[in-house]
Image (tube, rainbow, N blue to C red):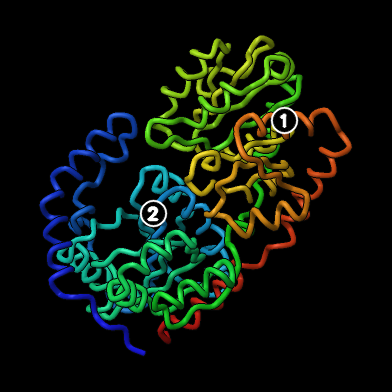
Amino acid sequence: MTPRPAPRWALVLYSWAWRLLLPLALARLWWRGRREPLYRAWLGERLGRYRNAPPRGDDATLLVWVHAVSLGETRAAAPLLDALRQAQPGLRVLLTHMTASGRDAGRGLLRDGDLQLWLPYDLPGALRRFLRHWRPALGVLMETEIWPNLLAVCAEQGVPLLLANARLSPRSAARWARWPRLAAAAFGAITSAAAQTADDAARLRALGVVDAIVAGNLKFDRPSDAQLHALGRRWRAQAARPVLLLASTREQNGVAEESLLLDAMPAALRARVLVVLVPRHPPRFDGVARIAQQHGLRVARRSEALPAADTELWLGDSLGEMAAYFAMADAAFVGGSLLPLGGQNLIEACAEGCPVVMGPHTFNFAQAAEQAAAAGAMRQVDDAAAVWRALQDWLDQPTRREAAQRAALAFSAAHRGAAAAHAAWIAQHLPAR
């Protein structure tokens, strides 16, 4: 069934709102560039303006555009690109992002002939310039990138759009369902979706995606980095005591998970462990260091020194080393879950054999969290005090901790295979060469 188009006036008003807010969006980029200079680079790309010459001749038919908005999506794209290149030798990739952390991580995924850009803002003119200049054979959007003009302009220009590693929480689906015509137009413009779970696929179909398959979660297929694992084990030896990791912590509406956790930390536990704290977003590093110092903790930073004998909290203010932090830890709390943010990636922890504690909010990884808990690799608790009780229980009972570590590795290994399934699915939509 062909989706009913969204009202023309709705897209016009949306586009005019974008134009009016564009100066503020560019000013925000410049502001963020104080701490992350990459935001100030290649600003023209945000408006579909390019210095590079467009691809010519047959090369254009080999160009596949993959959009990985931020760091998590870029990491998920890594095994997909490896599998796709293996299945389709000679394929060229146009990798786009919206955040500095995503673009920085994406550099390591490029091969000869590949390109990397900012995706333009959701303005019709900028998106048309982007598609006409680069002429991708198709677009692959990672996870949940649903933008009205992006979908409309791709349909207008005849560029098929695939939604890879797709997930849609019940909360997001309910929000879209309040606007059925807009949802039908947006999701109906997606050529095909490869969902992480059967529930995700069902919610996508209900909102208008005609073709939705289940291909698994690409984050299980991210290969372990032997160098990072070895680095984490060296850090563990340097610590010379039990290590508890607070990973990917976040804040919402002025409430920081770091404050909740440090407020609830038992004094007896503080005296016997090294706490490693890795905030989710780099701009928060300095603020989180102040929170730790305000709690009277002796703080060292990864960017400055290794943990000393008297270090109580080691701040992981680095990018691209999360696997090393998990390899270092006896057990970890994974953030975004004490606050109603849906939780961050627990799969990466399990891949390093690190058992996980999470708070009550795990809707971003609902099935993975449920399966990890059933496997014995994860415990879900209600509040910050319960986080410490669960972590301390693993420390106090080595047999249980070692069983949870083995369960984490087994859980991670049991769910691999999504990359090959995604590569085969994308190949079905590539034009004949």
Name the residue tied to disc 1: 389
Secondary structure of the residue carrying tag 2 is loop
Crowd tier of the residue under label 1, counting other residues whose Cα lies within 10 Å: few below 14, some 14–19, many 20 or above? some
Q: Which residue lies at the image location 55% right of the left edge and 73% below the top edge?
A: 423
Q: Rounded to the nearest whole Å, what is the CA distance between mark 1 and mark 2?
A: 36 Å
Q: Spot the residue most to the right.
A: 399
Q: Which residue lies at the image location 69% right of the left edge and 62% below the top edge?
A: 415
Q: Which residue lies at the image location 47% right of the left edge and 55% below the top edge?
A: 73
Label ID, residue 299:
none
Q: Is residue 183 visible?
A: yes
Between 53 and 250, the residue placed more toward the observer is: 250
Name the residue tied to disc 2: 69
Q: Is residue 419 left or right of residue 233?
A: left
Amino acid of disc 1: Arg
Residue 300 occupies quadrant: top right
What is the x, y in percent for residue 250? 47, 36
Between 114 and 47, the residue placed more toward the observer is: 47
Amino acid of disc 2: Val
What is the x, y in percent for residue 189? 33, 77
Q: Is residue 243 left or right of residue 260?
A: right
Sequence-wise, the earlier of marks 1 and 2 is 2
Secondary structure of the residue carrying tag 1 is helix
Q: Is residue 55 visible?
A: no
Crowd tier of the residue under label 2, counting other residues whose Cα lies within 10 Å: few below 14, some 14–19, many 20 or above? many
Assign the N terminus to one quadrant of the image. Answer: bottom left
Q: Is residue 285 left or right of residue 27?
A: right
What is the x, y in percent for residue 219? 59, 57
What is the x, y in percent for residue 268? 73, 15
Residue 103 to residue 90: above or below: above
Between 166 and 174, the residue placed more toward the observer is: 174
Residue 184 occupies quadrant: bottom left
